[in-house]
Amino acid sequence: MARTPGGPADVLRQIPMILAKDLLIEWRARSRAFALACFALTLLLLFSFAVGADAATLRAHAGAYLWMSVLLSSTLLLAQSLQHEVEGGALDTLTLAPVSPAALFYGKALANAAQLVLLTAVALPPVIALFDAPVKEPLGLLVLVSVLGCAGVAAPGTLYAALTARLASKQLLLPLLLFPLIVPCLLASVKATSLLMSGDPMGQVGSWLGLLLAFDVLYWSLCGLLFGRVIAA
Amino acid sequence: MGSEGAAADRLLSWDRVSLVIGLLLLIVGHYQGLFVAPAEAMMGDVGRILYVHVPTAWACMLVYTACFVFAGLALWSGKGKWDAAMEASAEVGVLYNALLLIQGSLWARPTWGVFWTWDPRLTTSAIVLVLFVGVLVLRRVITEPERRLNLGSIAAVLAYAGVPIVYFSVKWWRTLHQPFSSPATVSDSFITPLRLAAFGMIFLGIGLIGLRWRALRREVERELSAPALPAALPTLELGQRGPGGAA
Amino acid sequence: MTADTSEAPVAALPPPAAAVSCVGLARRFGRRWAFSRVDLEVPAGQRLLVMGANGSGKTTLLKVISTLLAPSLGQLRVCGIDPAEDPAAARRRLHLLSHSLGLYEDLSGEDNLRVFGRLLGKDDLDVDPVLRQVGLERRPDPIRAYSAGMRKRLQLAALLVKGPELTLLDEPFAALDPLGCAAVEGLIAALPGAVIVASHQVVRASRLCERAILMDQGAVRWMGPAEQAVEAWRALHGGDDLQGGG
C-alpha cells in the first residue's frame, strides 16, 4: 500500500474515483434525475407557450430553447452535487482520506458535465419533435457542441456550487453568479446548435466551436486552481 | 498603524486631492467638450455625450482592472487592506458601469431611435455589471471575515477573467458595431476635451475608491485582526491529590 | 495496523513520535477565540478524554487536531508530522468521527464503505467482516433510512476500514440509547492506536481512557488521570447532575 503523498499521480488516480462515486450516487437516487429530466421537458413546453404557436419562429429558435432548458435545470443539478458533500459532512471524510482538492474538483466537474450531456441528449428528441427542427448537419458535430457546451457550464458551475453551498441564500446566489459568467458559452452553444439544425453553408460552426473550446480551457484550468481555496474557506 | 491613522484624518489626504483634481478636470474637459469643440459631423450636438461616455468606459475598465489586482493581492496575502480595496474598487466599478449603461441608453435613443442596442461593448458592460453586482452581493451575504475575503476575491477573479471572452462572444454574435473611438481616429479638436475628461474620470475614480477604502478598511481589518488572547484561567485543584500539568 | 514496515521511506518515522503534540495551540473565528493556550502531548497508543460543557471548545480543538481547520496560533504535530507542511501525510494517519455523518445519505452502507475503501487505495475491500464487526449487515437501502445507532456503527465501520494511528471521536455517544452506547463503548475500547474522545458523558467516556483534560471557555482547566475525571468535572461544574452515568 505504498503511495506517494499528494503528487500529480495521486490526483490522476483519484479523479476517476470521485467521478465514479458521484455517478453512483446519482444512479442510486435516479428518481431525482428523472424528476430533473421532467423539469427540463416542462421548460420546453413553457417556452412554446410563451412564444406562441408560430411554427417558423419556434423552429428558428429551437437551439435556444434546448440550451435554456438545460441551463435552467443545470443549477438544480449543480447545487445537488455539492449538497451531497456538505449535508452529511462527507466533504470532511474526503479531505481526510485524503483526496486532493484538484481531484475532487475535476472528478465532480466531469460527473456534472456527463450528466448535463445526458440531459441534453434526453431533451434533444422532444426539441426536434416539438419544434419540427431536424438536425441537417452531421449528428456527431452536435454531440461535440453538446459536450463542449456542457463542459463550459460544469466547470464554473461546480466551483460556484461549492462557493455557495454553505451560504444561506445559495439557491439565489448560484444562478446570480453563474449565469452572467457563462454567457459566452450559452451564446456559442446556441449559435452552433441552431446552425447545425438549419444547415451551415458558410461553415460558421467551426468558429463557435473554437470559442467554446477557449471558454472551456480558460475555466477548467482557472477553477481547478481556485477550488482548493473555495473548499478550505 | 497609528501614524497612518493620523494621516488618514488630515484634510489633504491623497484621495481627497485626487477627487478635487478629478472634478476640476471634468469641469474643464466638459466645458471644452460642450462649448469649445465643434459639433460632431454625423450626430450634431448629441455627439457631445461622447465626452462623457467614452471617458467613463475607459475609467470603468481601469477600475475593474484595479479590482482584479486587489482581489489577487487579497488572495495571495490574506490582508484586510487589499480585501477592503477590492470591495471599494468593485463598488466604484459598479457605479461607473451603471453610469455607462445610462449614458449608452441616452446616446442610443437619438442616434438609433431605441434605448438599447445589442452593441458588443454595451452588452458586455451590462453582463459585467451583473457579474460584479454578484460579487458585491456575495460579500454582503458572508458574515465570516476570512471566508468573505477568500470567496469574494475568487468570484472577482473569475468575473474579471471572463470579460474578454464575453466581449468576443457578443461581438461575434452581433457584428453590428461602431468603429472604435480612440484618440488616433478622432480629430484634434476632440482630443483635448476627451483626454481631460478621461483623466478626470480616472482621478475621480481613484478618489472615490480611496474614500470607500478608508471607510471599509478599518472595519475589515478590525474583523480580520486577532483579538488579544483571553486571560489564562487558573488550573483546577482537586482535593489532596495534585492535578496534572495543565496550561 | 499502526506501523507497516513495507511503506515508502517517507512514512518511516522514528517510532516514539507522539500521536499529537501541540504547543500554544489556539483557533479563532472572526473576533472570538474558540480555544487558546492549549499545550497537549498524547503519546502513541494513549487514550485521552476531552471533557467540557457545550461551547467549551472541544469540537473546534478536535477539528484543528484533525487538520480540517488550520490553527490560528501555535504549533501542531500529528504523528510527528507538521500538517501545515505535509497535510496529506498527516491526514493519512488520522480519522475523525464528528457530529455529522461524514458519509453519503443516498448510498447504502456497503456502497459507502466500498467508495471510501477505494479512495484509501483498498480496491478489493471485503465489507462483510467489517460490517459484522460493528454489528451491521448488508442492506440495500440508502443510509438516509438508518437509525442513529446504525449510523454511528457505520461511521465506526468506516473508521475500521481506514485503521488510523490516531482516532478522534467527537461525542460518540450523542443520540444513542443505552444499548447503543454500550455497543459503541465496546467498539471504541477495541480500537488500536491513540484515541481522543470528546464527550460530556464523563462517567462512560472516562472508563475508556487513561488520561483526561477538562476544557472550560476555550481553556484547559485540568489535566490528569482519567480516574479523577469525574472529580474534576464536579469541581468545576459542581452538583451531581453528571450526564452519561450507568
Image: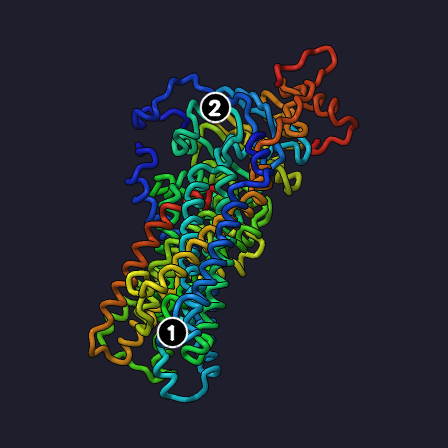
Task: State the separation of the CA atoms marked 2 and 1.
Answer: 57 Å
Callout 2 crowding tier (Cα within 10 Å): few <14, some 14–19, many ≥20: many
Which quadrant would the C terminus of chain B be assigned to in this image? Answer: top right
Q: Mark 1 lies on which chain?
A: A
Q: Residue at x 20, y 74 (%)?
A: A203
Image coordinates for residue B185, horizontal then vertical, percent: 29, 65
- x 34%, y 22%: residue: C12
Label count reads 2
Query: On the image, which quarter does residue B47 sit in?
Result: bottom left
Instruction: Check disc 2 and report its element: helix, strand or loop.
Output: loop
The front one of B190 and C171 is B190
Q: Is A115 located above or below residue B43 in the figure?
A: above
Q: Which residue lies furthest to the right in this view?
A: C239
Q: Name the residue under label 2.
A: C19
| Residues tagged by mark 2 and mark 1 found on one chain of the structure | no
Image vertical order of residue B116 relative to residue B192, above or below: below
Residue in the foreground of this view, choosing between A141 and A61: A61
Compared across the picture, whether C176 is left or right of C76 comes to: right
Residue at x 49%, y 37% (from the top left corner): B79
Query: Residue at the location (38% across, 88% down)?
Result: A55
Amino acid type, callout 2: Ala
- Counting from the top left corner in percent of width and height, residue C83 is at 43, 29
Q: In this view, does B164 lie to the left or right of B114?
A: left
Residue type marked 1: Leu
Report the residue marked by disc 1: A66
In the rendered image, is residue A154 in sight?
Answer: no
Q: Is residue A100 in sight in this rendering? A: yes
Q: Where is residue B56 in the image (x, y as percent from the top left)?
A: 44, 60
How many neighbours does mark 1 have within 10 angstroms: few (below 14), some (14-19), or many (20 or more)? many
- The reply to whether discs 2 and 1 touch (Cβ–Cβ < 8 Å) is no
